[in-house]
Image (spheres, rainbow, N blue to C red):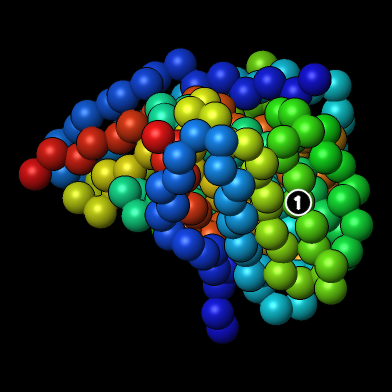
Amino acid sequence: GAGVSQTPSNKVTEKGKYVELRCDPISGHTALYWYRQSLGQGPEFLIYFQGTGAADDSGLPNDRFFAVRPEGSVSTLKIQRTERGDSAVYLCASSPVGGETGEQYFGPGTRLTVT
Amino acid sequence: AQTVTQSQPEMSVQEAETVTLSCTYDTSENNYYLFWYKQPPSRQMILVIRQEAYKQQNATENRFSVNFQKAAKSFSLKISDSQLGDTAMYFCAFPRRGGADGLTFGKGTHLIIQP
């Protein structure tokens, strides 16, 4: 079946602009995660959805970052007033109901470059 | 807080050799899972192997195996008969809160397989 997809693959934007990054999880997966991966680092947790609600958004760095998942499937990560420090690869992952094993399926990521 | 440490930023071996990547972690949980993920240049994170902490037997997946030492909080990955396609970043990961609430990753080891 189809895996996790993310669009766009690459996004270049100017400092101060607003961007939206989209994630389509695996069909039927209720848990969805966003991570940010800076150059030379491992992914860092941003936010976790269980269904439509954000179960844990403690990883969001500040109030410029916001994510939604209105119908419990597709999710959008929104970044306002982008800064050069926001440049990174943004990874999305999903897992089945419960996800007790912690196993997650990742998308290919969106590389965001803020100039 | 959970922490994951990978002390080898980069490793290089010849094709067909065996290589071991190290990982240590810190947790107060008793039952948990540990993961090794592979990230090739395509950026797609791929699950390599998973270990359940309550199982004493080390997990094995074809050429990949782990050496899990729970008391020492050590979780190393052994790759036997290494292949050129094994060249990638490898990340050790641990559930943030022992369950479904996202993963904490190490900084990664860049593994290079030389022909």
Residue at image point 90% right, 48% down: A55
Q: Is residue A12 left or right of residue A99?
A: left
Where residue A12 appears, as percent x and y from the top left, is 41, 47
Residue at image point 68% right, 21% down: B3
Residue at image point 20% right, 40% down: B113
Q: Is residue B16 above or below residue A16?
A: below
Identify residue type, mark 1. Answer: Ala
Where residue A114 appears, as percent x and y from the top left, is 45, 37
Residue B14, by quadrant, is: top left
**Taking the image as drawn, is residue B11 in sight?**
yes
In this view, the residue farthest toward the bottom is A1
Residue at image point 72% right, 63% down: A75
Q: Is residue B91 left or right of residue B42?
A: right
**In front of the other: A60 or A51:** A60
**In front of the other: A62 or A97:** A62
Q: Which corner quadrant holds the C terminus of chain B?
A: top left
Q: Is residue A60 above or below residue A66?
A: above
Secondary structure type for disc 1: strand
How many marks do you count on the picture?
Answer: 1
**Taking the image as drawn, is residue A43 in sight?**
no
The residue indicated by pointer 1 is A67
Where residue A71 appears, as percent x and y from the top left, is 84, 73
Q: Which corner quadrant holds the N terminus of chain B?
A: top right
Q: Is residue B6 left or right of residue B57?
A: left
**In front of the other: B93 or A20:** A20
Where residue A60 appears, as percent x and y from the top left, is 74, 34
**In front of the other: A38 or A27:** A38
